[in-house]
Structure formats: structure tokens, C-alpha cells
Image (tube, rainbow, N blue to C red):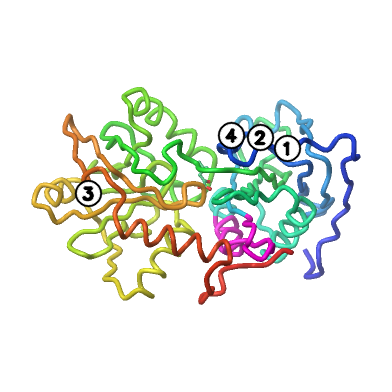
């Protein structure tokens, strides 16, 4: 595609079809969608074309579309924030779009220039600016997605794709909000294997995790903590988020070695920790080390980071029949600090030293 701007056709929903805005204090996560969506198509001859913002509506797809059969689907998650001065802000959108292109390469899907995706996102958010919640902590969650749309049953990369962006006003991801969650340490199922697609944000990773999540929830746990696939020993991720440990005043998180998602919130927390002068270590950490540290008192906090969940403190781990209580089941000062700091930057209440925020309006 040439380096000119995207030409986006805008078809606004008629006034009488505009949806009623939801109660901002009871949003939950991901079940309400705004009035419009962005859509763009790709094929081998035309590349990316037919960019449009249109009323939110169903897709009509051939049942043989390859996404239904072979799962070529990638997505991103980011948020728009209503700032204290009434401005509308995005948090590190370029990082999401760079990651989306990496996912595309891994899944043999076409890339999209980051500037074009950002232009599309800003245009959609601007049009939907009245949907960005103003209630404390609530945001407009944005879901850029790409799917294989060619109708064909032979296994190969699709020759046609649809890229779209949805917008959904959201509150907290977990019912617990910022309160500590209980986590089941998963030692039977695995999320990703070396050489697999664990670092791509592709639908199959999420599909593969649902069985473990369901079983954990049936046992009263909110999420699972994944261990590595080879030895069932090293910590990978917490559900759909990255894992952090505070051990002897040091912040530890598993390294990006191909099987975990390179989280934008993970990267931001690492940067904020460096800014704060904290000792930071990206290294492998085993579940046995965590159990031992909990026993000898050196484990201070565990929390997870992700766009949807922001920072989520872990109050309890259940591993092989034992309950490991962390920080008396309470939110610790390090998780609290990163939560406050990140949210203050995201909502424009604090200076943004790393120029993470992008203004839409
Ligand atoms: C996010 O945190 O934005 C994600 O994409 C995870 C999803 C399961 C909500």
C-alpha cells in the first residue's frame, strides 16, 4: 500500500437508530457496543481497500470462510480514556499495532501500516467520543481484529481478510475490581509451547485456555496461573495477563521468550519500576520458588497486568492441594502504586514522561 493516508468512507447511523447509552456505573466488560465500527478488506490484487466507518452491524460471511475452519484470527485490546480536562486519550496505541503486525506475520496474515491503523482508530473514537465513559475508572475498550474471510477448505493462508475495530464501554474486567483475586495454579493443561504461537495475540490461544479457566472457576478460582509446557515448573502468565512477583523488594517477571504475550501494560510497569528505582529482574521463576518464598516470608506481593484488567492483585494461589496466601490476601503497596500511577497517566491526571498518551479530541 502507498504511504498516503487511508481514505475512510463514513456512513453514520441514522439518529433514530442510535443506541441508548448504558448506566456507566454498571458497565461490566465487553457486552455493550457503540453505534459504529471500522471495517477494511484485503485481497491479493487490491491489498487493503474499502476502508469505512459504518453503523455497527452483523457481517455476512460464507460458511467456508477460513477463519471458521482454521482459525486465522488476531486481535488487540486497548482503551480510550476520558481525561480530567475533557480530553479523549489513547494509551500507547502504536505498541498495540506493532504487536498486531507481529501477530500477523506469525499467523501468515497481511500487515497494516501502523499509521493507518492509528488513523482508523482515531477516526472511530472521535466519531464515538460521546461513548467514552466519564465515570471513575470506566473506559472505552477498543478491539482491532483481523480474520481470514476467503471461502476455501484447503489448508493454506487465506487470500482475503477483514480488519475491523469495535468499541465497547467497560468497567472493571474482574468482578473483584481492584481487590485481590484467587488463582488456580494449572499443572495439567498448558497454554503455549516453545515454537508455537504463545506470543501472538491470536484467537486460538484464548480458545485453548477456556477449559482450564472453566475448571478453575468451578472450583471457586477467578483465573489460572499457567506453567511452562515442558516441565510444568516455570511461571508463564496469569490467565490473559502477565505475572509479576515482589520478592525481597525485587520486582520479578518471566522473560519474553516466545511463549507469553508481550504485554503493553507489562512493558509500562517495567518502565515505571525503573523510573522508581526499583530492582527489576526479567527472569524465569518457578512455582517451587514462589511456594518457598511464601513459606519463608520473602514473597511480598503477586499481581498481574493487562489492558482489560490493568493491575490485578493476587491474594491466593492454589497449587497441588495447598492454598498459598499472599500478603494476607490483601492488595499490597507495589500493586497499588503501579495501579495508581498508570491510571493517573492514562486519565491525564499526571505528567506523561514517556509520551505514552495520544490525544484524539
Ligand atoms: C486484554 O487485556 O485487552 C485482552 O485482550 C484480554 C481479553 C481476554 C480481554
Residue 158, percent across and down? 67, 42
Q: Are marks 3 and 4 in contact (CB under 8 Å)?
A: no
Which numbered disc, 1 or 3, marks the residue that appears first in the sequence? 1
Q: Are marks 2 and 1 in contact (CB under 8 Å)?
A: yes
Side (left or right) of 242 relative to 295:
right
Tag 2: Cα neighbours inside 10 Å, few (<14), some, or many (≥20)?
many
Magenta span of residues: 80-102
Q: Which residue is mark 2?
A: 66
Kindly identify which numbered label has been placed on residue 89.
Answer: none
Quadrant (top left/top right/bottom left/bottom right) for the C terminus:
bottom right
Q: CA distance from mark 3 to mark 4?
A: 44 Å
Residue 287, percent across and down? 20, 46
Query: As drawn, which residue projects farthest toward the top?
Result: 218
Q: Camera-side residue: 14 or 37?
A: 14
Q: Are marks 1 and 3 in contact (CB under 8 Å)?
A: no
Q: CA distance from mark 4 to mark 2?
A: 6 Å
Q: Which residue is mark 3?
A: 327
Amino acid at each position: 500500500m502507498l504511504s498516503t493516508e487511508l481514505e475512510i468512507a463514513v456512513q453514520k447511523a441514522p439518529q433514530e437508530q442510535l443506541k441508548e447509552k448504558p448506566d456507566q456505573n454498571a458497565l461490566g466488560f465487553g457486552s455493550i457496543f457503540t453505534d459504529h465500527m471500522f471495517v477494511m478488506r484485503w485481497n491479493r490484487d487490491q491489498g487493503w481497500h474499502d476502508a469505512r466507518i459504518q453503523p455497527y452491524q452483523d457481517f455476512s460471511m460464507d460458511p467456508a470462510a477460513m477463519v471458521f475452519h482454521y482459525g486465522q484470527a488476531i486481535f488487540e485490546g486497548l482503551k480510550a480514556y476520558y481525561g480530567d480536562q475533557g480530553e479523549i486519550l489513547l494509551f500507547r496505541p502504536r505498541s498495540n499495532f506493532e504487536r498486531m503486525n507481529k501477530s500477523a506475520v506469525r499467523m501468515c496474515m497481511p500487515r497494516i501500516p501502523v499509521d493507518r491503523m492509528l488513523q482508523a482508530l482515531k477516526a472511530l473514537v472521535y466519531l464515538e467520543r460521546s461513548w467514552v465513559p466519564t465515570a471513575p475508572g470506566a473506559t472505552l475498550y477498543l478491539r482491532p481484529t483481523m480474520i481470514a474471510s476467503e471461502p476455501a477448505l484447503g489448508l493454506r493462508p487465506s487470500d482475503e481478510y477483514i480488519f475491523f475495530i469495535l468499541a465497547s464501554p467497560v468497567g472493571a474486567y474482574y468482578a473483584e475490581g481492584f481487590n485481590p483475586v484467587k488463582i488456580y495454579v494449572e499443572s495439567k493443561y498448558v497454554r503455549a509451547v516453545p515454537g508455537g504461537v504463545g506470543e501472538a495475540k491470536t484467537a486460538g490461544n484464548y480458545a485453548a485456555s477456556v477449559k482450564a479457566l472453566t475448571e478453575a472457576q468451578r472450583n471457586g478460582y477467578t483465573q489460572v496461573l499457567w506453567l511452562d509446557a515442558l516441565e510444568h515448573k516455570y511461571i508463564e502468565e496469569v490467565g490473559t495477563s502477565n505475572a509479576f512477583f515482589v520478592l525481597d523488594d525485587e520486582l520479578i517477571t518471566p522473560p519474553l521468550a516466545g511463549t507469553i504475550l508481550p504485554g503493553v501494560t507489562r512493558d509500562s510497569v517495567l518502565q515505571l519500576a525503573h523510573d522508581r528505582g526499583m530492582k527489576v529482574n526479567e527472569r524465569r521463576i518457578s512455582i517451587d520458588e514462589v511456594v518457598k518464598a511464601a513459606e519463608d516470608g520473602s514473597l511480598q506481593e503477586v499481581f498481574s497486568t493487562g489492558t482489560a484488567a490493568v493491575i490485578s492483585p493476587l491474594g491466593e494461589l492454589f497449587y497441588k492441594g495447598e492454598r498459598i496466601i499472599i500478603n494476607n490476601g490483601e492488595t499490597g503497596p507495589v500493586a497499588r502504586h503501579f495501579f495508581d500511577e498508570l491510571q493517573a497517566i492514562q486519565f491525564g491526571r499526571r505528567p506523561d514522561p514517556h509520551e505514552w498518551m495520544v490525544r484524539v479530541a
